[in-house]
Image (cartoon, rainbow, N blue to C red):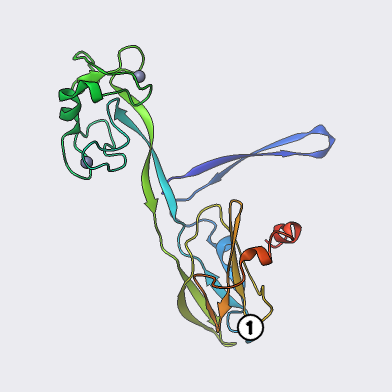
Amino acid sequence: MPCKRFCLQCVRPFGKQLHLSVRFYRCSPPVGLLQKVKFGDLNADGKLDILVPPNDSYQDIQYVELPVWAPHNCPYCDGSEPITDSYSIHCRYCGIDLKLYYEQNPYNASCRECGLQLQTCYNDPNYPGQSLCCPPTHGSVILAEIEMGYVDNGNQWSCYINTGKGFTATTQNIVNVEYDDKITVMDMNRDGLSDLIQIRGTQAKLYLNSKGTIQSSTPVSPPSTFLPEHPVLCLRMW
Ligand SMILES: [Zn+2]
Ligand SMILES: [Zn+2]
């Protein structure tokens, strides 16, 4: 999993500025797991139970060197990002030699960066295998951001039910979790059972608890019943 680094800037009173550089490691070991653990009463017995979310799911974005002819979609099978490094020439889905295709169909070969039609060049000593290039600017290989796809780490939460003398471990399939999600566990409909609220970007979703099991979909009571009128309350919940 890629590491992300964020810079936070805090403005302090008296005109002083404090700059904080914070690193969030999304790699193993799971730093921050404790903050992700939630507490609630899943079975309305008055005892606090523990919910541990699945690992984050995420869109895998990588920065790689690519030949300038590398298309976003394979001309044969339409697979997304068929070429994923500067050495591969075959579509990673259908296996067809795409370099050969563009050499034989130069009118279809355009620069991935600027869209200009590519030309044949044999003289790039750094990338001798690449015979197509964008002569004015981009040469034969560029640095590109590609989406490798969604890494789905599932929706299975671990639940530790408090018996008063210990915990009974179970699992519940509720919802995937992403890095920036805000998740709160609390009783939203006042039936004594803790429900789960997930906020992703500007969207809030409510997962109601029915007989001790948090439902992976919410058939009734859309979250708008609870959330939008109380933005301040929501912000203070975590
Ligand atoms: Zn293909
Ligand atoms: Zn170009």
Displayed quadrant of residue 126: top left
- Is residue 93 visible in the rendered image? The answer is yes
- Is residue 127 visible in the rendered image? The answer is no
**10 Å crowding of disc 1: few (<14), some (14-19), many (20+):** some
Displayed quadrant of residue 98: top left
Could you say which is closer to the camera, residue 106 or residue 64? 106
User: Relative to 61, is 193 on the left or the right?
Assistant: right
Task: Pinpoint residue 157: horizontal percent, then vertical percent.
Answer: 47, 70
Displayed quadrant of residue 15: top right
Image quadrant where one finds the C terminus: bottom right
Could you say which is closer to the camera, residue 105 or residue 39? 105
Residue at 27% from the left image edge and 43% from the top image edge: 79
Picture layout, residue 64 above or below residue 183: above
Ligand 1 quadrant in view = top left
Task: Pinpoint residue 92: horizontal percent, then vertical percent.
Answer: 23, 43
User: Relative to 185, is 112 on the left or the right?
Assistant: left
Q: Which residue is mark 1?
A: 47
Residue at 62% from the left image edge and 71% from the top image edge: 221
For the residue marked with disc 1, what is the amino acid? Lys
Picture layout, residue 161 above or below residue 100: below
Residue lying furthest right:
14
